[in-house]
Amino acid sequence: QMAVADRCGTARLAVYRDNGGHNTLFPDARASEFVDVETTTLDEALADVARVDLIKIDAEGAEPLVWSGLRQTLGRSPHVRVFMEFAPSLLRRAGQEPGAFMDRLTAAGFRLQRVHDESGALQEVTREELCAAFSVNLMLTRTVAPARVSCATSSGKTTSWQIAGPRRSPSQSRRRSS
C-alpha cells in the first residue's frame, strides 16, 4: 500500500470501510481504522517518464501535497493537462486554505476550468465559486509554458525551477537567424 504526497516516507492513512474512495491522510471522525503506508511523490514515481500528458489527482484533501511532489514532472511536461478534485472542506481539514491553493495553481501558469459533472463541458469558474463549492472537478491547462515556476512546499519553503524551451536543431537555428 502506498500514498502519493509531497515526500517519500510513511504516513497514517485513514480507511473508510464503507467507501474506500474516501480513504485519506486527513480523516474525520467517521474513519473506521488506520494503516501505516509508504508515501512517494509523483516526481519519484514518474522519474523515468520523459513527459506526461495527463494527470488525474483526487486525493481527498491531499491535493496540495500531491501538487508539491510533482514539480519536476510539470517542468518536463509543458503541455500537461491536469484533472483535479477541488473540495474546499477537505482542503481545510488538511490545513490548507482553498483560495491559497488556487493561487498556487494559477501562479504555476495554469488556467482552471470546471468540468460539468453531467456533460463534461468545460466552464469558467471564479475564485468565489470554487471556494464556496462542496466539490468541483477541474481541468488545469497551461496558459503559457512558464520560464520559471515557483511552488510552496508543505513546510512553507518556496522552491523554484527552470523550464527549458523547445530544442532547436542547428539547421533550425540558422534558418531563424537569417
Image: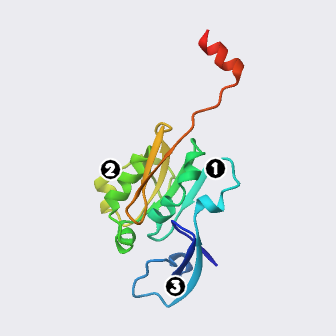
Q: Is residue 43 left or right of residue 65?
A: right
Label located before the other in sequence (1 or 2): 1
Label located before the other in sequence (2 or 3): 3
Q: On screen, 33 above or below 138?
A: below
Q: Amino acid at mark 1?
A: Val
Q: Quadrant of the N terminus?
A: bottom right
Please state which of the two labelled residues, at mark 1 or mark 2, is closer to the viewer. 1
Circle 3 sits on which residue?
Answer: 16
- For mark 2, give the secondary structure: loop
Give the image quarter of residue 56. Answer: bottom right
Circle 1 sits on which residue?
Answer: 52
Mark seen at residue 126? 2
Query: What whole-number distance in Å separates the C-alpha atoms at marks 3 and 1?
Result: 31 Å
Q: On screen, 101 above or below 14?
A: above
Residue ID at (50%, 53%): 119
Q: Residue furthest top?
A: 178
What crowding class fits label 1: few (fewer than 14 Cα within 10 Å), some (14-19), or many (20 or more)?
some
Q: Is residue 55 left or right of residue 22?
A: right
Q: Amino acid at mark 3?
A: Tyr
Query: What whole-number distance in Å separates the C-alpha atoms at marks 1 and 2?
Result: 27 Å
Residue 78 locus on image (x, y percent): 57, 41
Labels 1 & 2 near each other (Cβ < 8 A) = no
Residue ID at (66%, 14%): 174
Q: Nearer the viewer, residue 10 or 95?
A: 10
- For mark 3, give the secondary structure: loop
Q: Amino acid at mark 2?
A: Thr
What crowding class fits label 3: few (fewer than 14 Cα within 10 Å), some (14-19), or many (20 or more)?
some
